[in-house]
Amino acid sequence: MIFQIHCGDGDPEQAKKGPKAWGSSLAFYSPGLFSFYQFAKLDVKLKFNDLIKKYYLRLGSEILACLNGLIGILLLGLDDQNEEALKGVEDILQALERKVGTRMFYGTIWLVSILSCNIFS
């Protein structure tokens, strides 16, 4: 629902503005959404992966505001046993690397790894 309101689904005026108009709102609400990913059921994770592909990967520089959290949950998603979910996470990570650049991407992975003790435990 929040994504629909802030990202323009159903609102032609907001949709015309595109990611530049709603990118900061998406980054604002993201930390609350990210915390549920690790414990979500498989069907919810698949839908969340679709949300990331549809909305987050369309952002420009606004994605940097939530990159730490986004990569953090995606690293947790690499532990998934479902092949479809794992493939989705791998595709998103590759797209993120292309979008933000290799240096920023791997720098963020290291930062998240150092700051989050539960990723590799």
Image (tube, rainbow, N blue to C red):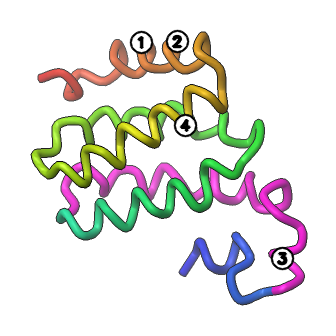
Residue 22 lies in magenta, yes or no?
yes
Q: Residue at x 14, y 51 (%)?
A: 82
Q: Residue at x 18, y 21 (%)?
A: 120
What main secondary structure does the magenta stretch of the protein show? helix
Indicate the position of residue 88 as horizontal and vertical percent values.
Answer: 35, 49
Q: Residue at x 50, y 63 (%)?
A: 51
Q: Earlier in the sequence, mark 3 or mark 2?
A: 3
From the image, tell me which residue sits under label 1: 110
From the image, tell me which residue sits under label 2: 107
Report which quarter residue 97 is drawn in. top right
57 over 48 or under it: above or below:
above
From the image, tell me which residue sits under label 3: 14
Q: Magenta part of the protein: which range?
A: 12-40
Towards the viewer: 28 or 18? 18
Q: Is residue 13 left or right of residue 40?
A: right
The reply to whether callout 3 and callout 2 are in contact (CB within 8 Å) is no
Characterize the local packing of mark 1: few (<14), some (14-19) or many (20 or more) Cα atoms within 10 angstroms.
few
86 over 104 or under it: above or below:
below
Q: Is residue 81 left or right of residue 17?
A: left
